[in-house]
Image (cartoon, rainbow, N blue to C red):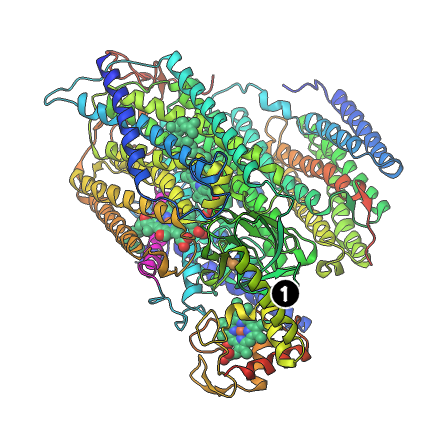
């Protein structure tokens, strides 16, 4: 009896200690959405995780403590060659350790289903944004305002529904601070419901292996106040309207819409692809050691058949071909736009 | 021993089962062309499958006690039987997977196929199972000659089925546009599904034919006797299994769902 | 050397090369005749040529190495003797076709160790790259086998996964093959020829699988999801084909085990007097024998999609990429229980021997193996919670997944009860058993966390998953596998492995592994995605990753120590011919190494298998006279 009491106490103590230890380090990134919530928001992901942590600590102690206790307390003394006690089983015990976990399972499942229902709940006034994933960048379309962007801007405390699709392979939309992850599948539209609650810059990181530059498939996500969001939208709308007037302006819009700007910066920073800043007329070094001047022909070739000439230091398989997407005129517009970048 | 005590009653049973199967197949066809009730088709297919498994494939033999010690032929045959059935179970998972694929990709539509031909090859396969059963019964009674004749007929019919599907049906389907639809987004993967399912089945028919040839050839050499003919039994069970698969594939491809024309 | 060159293995390999050439030539010739392009700018030959080449290569291997020659004889009406006598001695036995289950068991184990070492080396290579953020040596400029750094990373990572998994399947087959007939008192498996064939399928299969890396690799992960795998280089076809061969090995092997257990048991060995490991083997084999077909089918469909343009999984052609995932996981989830059930069986088998106590709740443990296997068939979609599959499927799959915890829990509680008040002998095998329990427990309890959908939406495709499955796999397979090797090594060789080195192995591997696993889970929770060659330095994972890499190396070192111990002890180990573990199991009642035809006298079961501590009780009794063994019932 003494042994059982000691072990029982130890199990409780070890559970509390492990839980307290784990609780004291930040196991999850900051929670930036209603769905992520906190450990006190019943139904949120962090709430569910917290209970799971408790159960994990308990189950671990429940098994490990009596085991180690046995090693120490019942250890074989020197010179003892006897066998252990002959205990074949105990039906009551066996029933207990089948039924109790079963109850735990149902409790867990209930909580899981409850939480799922909670995070999938859609508000009536949810804002809808279209997301297009491609190797290896994201493009966001704001249908209410009619413009495209490679950055996802979201107003704080406003529920949004991302309607996502892919043009090539499967990708997965994930902002760790929002917690939820949803695959983006070609040929169908998947929905991602999120209500950002914390202003700040985040990254959407593609979480499904999608090819060579999967690791690099990251775009900015910016959660901002409603006022700032409105300013940004107005800006984008204005830019779009102004740009549509000129060929180079149209080129700029095309570059955003087709995801070019997801990989090619226009200010010299290095993304998945070479920057477009100041490249027109400049020399670039190819992977095979040659140097070539960037002119119309080279750009056209790069767009239609990106693998034909590889720029040194970049992955040639990153850029998809746009042969079937862009018309000649559109390419001309893009070239006109690239020319302006210097 | 088996339920059939003498040769004539065994043959009579074979005929009876054949008649049941024929009636059910015609019923199936009739249901499909008139009011197309998938649930009835499923029920009919399951009944047919049960008949084949019980009477042609003798699944009950798995339960037999094999007297004799571990190294006796009888005991080994029992072991082999179990092995063969597990193999068929395993193979059934492939075909089940293909059916799931078909239901998922095509739903309640079906490809434009030649109904007459479909019915014809199904009938041929059914007949071949009948003769296979007669052949096996003959062998079980030590009648090598009768066995060889029946297996020959089975073989010819099986070959007829194979050629009917691969040479005729595949060509007709191609003319209907099923191959062209491989690359056609509008029509869906109908062609791909059709060729994959019939192809996998045809592959099994082919292996079955090889198996039949092998046992025929061995019978010619006098390898089998009434007591020792596991090879014959295995070939027969395998052959009926191929028929069994077709019992499900035939309605799945030809009968259920609404017809879609490809252009 | 000459002996090697005339062995089945060498003959098979030569013919595999010839077959490959024939296949390539065939397709290239046909294409030339049809006026289609015959060469490829990068891989020299076209994809269909490579595929047929590899396939024929495998078939040629099998027909040339002698594992099917008896069947060809049967087909020609020629009877073959029941049991071949062995012509070979020493290592030659293992590179030639043998029908002896003990030899085949060792062959499987060796092949498994080879694959695990190669896979492990891949892991160490890509872990080195991951030790710090930014690209160090797998850079965009480097080029090997027509792949740049990130591509090579993807290939190595995917191959690491698949090689390890195949290594496990072969390892499982190895242990089962060696041990199960001995535990049953059988002379051999039910189908010795098929047993040999199953093993030899694995050799060309492994070669084809490995050849994927030189044919452009494949950047799909071991899961090979289309549309990505439909676009990957030719290497992915080799990956599919290799797995196809290995899959058949697994299917036929599993079938053999189930039939053996049903048909050839010692006298009076009824179901609940079988050693517990036999139960585990049956449960495992039920899975391999059936579900494996579905991974074959899913890979086959992608192969056809690539070769013939059939659009099964291509949305542009009306196909459904998610369907692939269903077919794939229908096998690949139950497969994880294939990895662990025998491992858990080893734990249950060895615990009573070293705790000197009966296995607590034997029957319920036996049933729990079947329970895990059967429930395991209906949980596959838990890998697809975020995949965009039908919404309404998620909750039922959560329930079924969580349910697996119940039979698994039964095992854990029974083990604890077995250990409780046990007089434990901490020999090396026991250390690994105890390590396995702790490690598998950690992996197991993270399972339900993933099963509860909404938390999985955060964790899926992160290093938390990577941590979860390394943990379950190490606890459920690697540790028990080592335990089994240490335990049955003397049975196979008549010598024992060094205890000191064994303990060093254990005490290096266990802490390093725990560090590896906790580190993985930690960064996974914080946002480290899996399958990435480089991570954002801003996330602050550099130091943890460095620790992970060091831990990985330490595991490698411990395995190297094991390998040294293993091969060295075969020759120089301390002689151990008797019942060195003081076990009740039948195979230990006869001298080691195991005699050629196992038991000279058949035995009869006269008691319970694990009645340790019950004086005078016995599990088996050897027939004094020569009454032939009656089987079954
Ligand atoms: C050996 C292999 C193995 C084993 C045994 C398991 C066991 C389990 N696994 Fe794991 N799993 C993998 C290997 C394994 N897994 C692999 C390889 C992957 C990733 C594949 C990939 O994507 O590459 C994966 C991924 C994976 C996922 C998908 C994650 C994702 O990608 O999003 C999920 C989700 O549900 C899951 C769940 C479980 C569960 C519930 C168990 C259960 O069987 C665990 C049961 C055990 C216990 C619960 C502990 C002991 C029980 C008790 C002490 C009793 C009381 C407990 C309760 C009542 C809860 N696993
Ligand atoms: C049996 C299963 C198994 C085992 C044992 C391991 C062992 C290891 N694994 Fe593996 N791992 C998987 C199965 C396994 N893994 C799977 C299925 C995946 C998923 C793949 C995917 O996503 O598609 C994966 C993925 C995976 C990743 C994630 C990759 C990614 O997502 O980007 C990482 C990262 O750290 C990793 C690390 C390791 C390490 C460091 C070890 C170490 O334990 C390795 C230790 C080293 C050895 C065991 C070899 C030692 C041998 C010698 C030194 C001997 C000398 C050599 C010869 C004689 C030839 N593994
Ligand atoms: Cu897109 Cu990974
Ligand atoms: Cu799983």
| Secondary structure beneath label 1 | strand
The residue to which callout 1 is attached is A147
To which quarter of the image does residue B119 belong? top right
From the viewer's perspective, is residue C162 above or below residue C631? below
Q: Could you classify mark 1 by the number of other residues whose Cα lies within 10 Å: few (under 14), some (14-19), or many (20 or more)?
A: some
Q: Predominant secondary structure in magenta? A: helix
C164 relative position to C131: left or right: right
From the viewer's perspective, is residue C40 above or below residue C124? below
- The one of B46 and C453 positioned closer to us in this rendering: C453
Ligand 1 sits in which quadrant?
Answer: top left
- The one of A213 and B91 positioned closer to us in this rendering: A213
From the viewer's perspective, is residue A274 above or below residue B234? below
Q: Residue at x 57, y 58 (%)?
A: A169
**Residue range (magenta):** C105-133
B150 relative position to C358: left or right: right
Hey, which residue is sitting farthest left in the picture?
A: A79
- The one of C514 and A232 positioned closer to us in this rendering: A232
Q: Is residue B81 visible?
A: yes
The quarter of the rendered structure image containing the C terminus of chain B is bottom right
C496 relative position to C320: left or right: left
Percent x, y of residue C377: 54, 34
Percent x, y of residue C201: 47, 48
- The one of C473 and C595 positioned closer to us in this rendering: C473
To which quarter of the image does residue C295 belong? top right
Q: Residue at x 83, y 43 (%)?
A: B120
Percent x, y of residue A289: 42, 83
To which quarter of the image does residue A25 belong? top left
Magenta-drawn stretch contains C109: yes
Q: Residue at x 47, y 45 (%)?
A: C458
């Amino acid at each position: 009896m003494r042994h059982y009491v000691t072990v029982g106490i130890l199990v409780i103590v070890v559970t509390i200690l492990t839980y307290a230890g784990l609780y004291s380090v930040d196991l999850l990134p900051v929670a930036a959405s209603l769905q992520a919530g906190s450990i006190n928001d019943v139904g949120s992901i962090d709430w569910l995780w917290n209970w799971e942590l408790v159960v994990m600590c308990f189950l671990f102690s429940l098994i490990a403590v009596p085991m180690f206790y046995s090693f120490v307390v019942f250890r074989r003394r020197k010179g003892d060659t006897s066998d252990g006690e002959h205990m074949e089983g105990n039906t009551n015990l066996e029933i207990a350790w089948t039924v109790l976990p079963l109850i735990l399972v149902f409790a867990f499942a209930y909580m899981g289903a409850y939480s799922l229902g909670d995070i999938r709940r859609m508000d009536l006034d949810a804002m809808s944004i279209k997301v297009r994933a491609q190797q290896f960048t994201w493009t966001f379309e704001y249908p209410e305002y009619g413009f495209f962007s490679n950055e996802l801007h979201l107003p704080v405390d406003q529920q949004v529904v991302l309607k996502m699709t892919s043009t090539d392979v499967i990708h997965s939309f994930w902002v760790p601070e929002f917690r939820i992850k949803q695959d983006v599948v070609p040929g169908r539209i998947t929905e991602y419901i999120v209500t950002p609650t914390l202003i700040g810059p985040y990254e959407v990181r593609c979480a499904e292996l999608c090819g060579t530059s999967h690791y690099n498939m990251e775009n900015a996500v910016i959660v901002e106040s409603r006022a700032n969001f409105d300013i940004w939208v107005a800006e984008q709308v204005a830019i779009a309207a102004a740009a549509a007037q000129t060929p180079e302006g149209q080129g700029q819009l095309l570059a955003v819409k087709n995801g070019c700007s997801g990989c090619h910066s226009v200010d010299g920073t290095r993304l998945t692809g070479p920057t477009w800043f100041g490249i027109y007329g400049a020399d670039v070094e190819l992977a095979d050691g040659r140097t070539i001047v960037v002119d119309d022909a080279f750009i056209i070739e790069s767009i239609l058949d990106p693998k034909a000439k590889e720029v040194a230091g970049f992955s040639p398989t990153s850029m998809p071909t746009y042969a079937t997407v862009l018309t000649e005129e559109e390419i001309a517009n893009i070239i006109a736009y690239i020319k302006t970048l210097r | 021993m088996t339920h059939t005590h003498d040769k004539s009653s065994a043959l009579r049973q074979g005929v009876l089962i054949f008649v049941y199967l024929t009636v059910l197949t015609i019923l199936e066809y009739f249901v499909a062309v008139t009011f197309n009730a998938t649930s009835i088709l499923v029920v009919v297919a399951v009944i047919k499958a049960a008949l084949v498994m019980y009477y042609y494939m003798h699944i009950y033999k798995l339960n037999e006690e094999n007297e004799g010690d571990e190294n006796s032929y009888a005991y080994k045959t029992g072991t082999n039987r179990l092995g063969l059935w597990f193999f068929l179970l395993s193979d059934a998972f492939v075909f089940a997977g293909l059916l799931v694929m078909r239901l998922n990709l095509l739903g309640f539509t079906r490809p434009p196929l030649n109904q007459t031909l479909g019915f014809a090859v199904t009938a041929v396969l059914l007949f071949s199972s009948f003769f296979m059963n007669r052949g096996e019964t003959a062998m079980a009674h030590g009648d090598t000659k009768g066995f060889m004749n029946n297996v020959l007929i089975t073989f010819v019919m099986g070959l007829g089925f194979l050629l009917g599907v691969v040479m005729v049906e595949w060509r007709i389907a191609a003319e209907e546009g099923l191959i062209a639809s491989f690359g056609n987004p509008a029509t869906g993967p109908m062609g791909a599904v059709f060729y994959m399912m019939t192809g996998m089945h045809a592959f099994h028919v082919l292996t079955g034919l090889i198996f039949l040839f092998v046992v025929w050839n061995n019978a010619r050499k006098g390898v089998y006797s009434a007591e020792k003919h596991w090879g014959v039994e295995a070939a027969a069970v395998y052959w009926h299994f191929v028929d069994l698969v077709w019992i499900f594939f035939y309605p799945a491809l030809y009968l259920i769902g609404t017809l879609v024309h490809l252009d | 050397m000459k002996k090697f060159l005339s062995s089945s293995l060498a003959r098979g390999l030569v013919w595999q090369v010839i077959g490959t050439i024939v296949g390539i030539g065939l397709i290239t010739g046909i294409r030339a005749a049809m006026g289609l392009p015959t060469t490829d700018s990068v891989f020299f030959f076209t994809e269909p040529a490579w595929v047929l080449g590899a396939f024929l290569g495998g078939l040629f291997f099998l027909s040339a190495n002698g594992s099917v020659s008896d069947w060809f004889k049967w087909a020609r009406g020629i009877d073959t003797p029941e049991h071949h006598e062995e012509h070979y001695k020493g290592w030659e036995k293992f590179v030639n076709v043998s029908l002896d289950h003990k030899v085949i068991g060792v062959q499987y184990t060796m092949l498994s160790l080879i694959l695990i070492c190669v896979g492990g080396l891949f892991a160490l290579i890509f872990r080195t790259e991951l030790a710090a953020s930014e690209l160090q040596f797998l850079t965009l400029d480097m080029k090997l086998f027509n792949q740049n750094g990130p591509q090579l990373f993807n290939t190595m990572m995917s191959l690491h996964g698949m090689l390890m998994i195949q290594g496990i399947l072969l390892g499982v087959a190895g242990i089962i093959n060696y041990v199960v007939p001995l535990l049953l008192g059988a002379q051999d498996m039910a189908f010795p020829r098929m047993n040999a064939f199953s093993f030899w399928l694995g050799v060309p299969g492994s070669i084809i699988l490995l050849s994927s890396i030189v044919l452009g690799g494949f950047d799909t992960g071991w899961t090979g999801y289309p549309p990505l795998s439909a676009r990957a280089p030719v290497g992915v076809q080799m990956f599919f084909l290799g797995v196809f061969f290995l899959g058949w090995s697994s299917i036929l092997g599993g079938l053999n085990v189930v039939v053996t257990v049903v048909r050839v048991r010692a006298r009076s060995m009824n179901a609940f007097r079988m050693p517990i490991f036999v139960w585990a083997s049956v449960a495992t084999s039920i899975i391999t024998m059936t579900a494996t077909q579905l991974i074959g089918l899913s890979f086959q469909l992608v192969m056809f999609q690539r070769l013939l343009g059939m659009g099964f999984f291509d949305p542009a052609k009306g196909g459904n990429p998610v369907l692939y995932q269903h077919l794939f996981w229908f096998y690949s989830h139950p497969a994880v229980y294939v990895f662990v059930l025998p491992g858990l069986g080893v734990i249950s088998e060895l615990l009573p021997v070293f705790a000197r106590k009966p296995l607590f709740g034997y029957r319920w443990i036996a049933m729990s193996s079947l329970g895990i296997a059967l429930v395991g068939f209906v949980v596959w979609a838990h890998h697809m919670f975020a995949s965009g599959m039908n919404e309404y499927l998620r909750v039922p799959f959560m329930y079924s997944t969580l349910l697996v915890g119940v039979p698994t829990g039964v095992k854990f509680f029974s083990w604890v009860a077995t250990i409780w008040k046990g007089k434990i002998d901490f020999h090396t095998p026991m250390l690994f058993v105890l390590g396995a329990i702790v490690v598998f427990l950690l992996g197991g309890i993270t399972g339900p966390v993933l099963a509860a959908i909404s938390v999985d939406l955060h964790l899926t495709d992160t290093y938390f998953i990577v941590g979860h499955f390394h943990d379950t796999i190490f606890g459920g397979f690697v540790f028990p596998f080592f335990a089994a090797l240490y335990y049955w090594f003397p049975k196979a060789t008549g010598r024992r492995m060094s205890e000191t080195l064994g303990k060093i192995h254990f005490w290096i591997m266990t802490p390093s592994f725990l560090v590896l696993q906790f580190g993985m889970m930690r960064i996974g929770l914080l946002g480290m995605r899996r399958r990435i060659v480089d991570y954002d330095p801003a996330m602050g994972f550099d130091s943890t990753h460095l620790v992970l890499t060091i831990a990985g190396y330490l595991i490698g070192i411990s395995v190297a120590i094991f390998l040294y111990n293993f091969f060295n002890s075969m020759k120089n180990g301390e002689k151990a011919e008797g019942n060195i573990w003081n076990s009740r199991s039948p195979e230990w009642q006869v001298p080691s190494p195991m005699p050629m035809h196992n038991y000279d006298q058949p035995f009869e079961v006269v008691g319970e298998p694990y009645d340790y501590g019950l004086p005078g009780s016995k599990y088996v009794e050897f027939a004094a006279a020569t009454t032939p063994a009656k089987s079954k019932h």
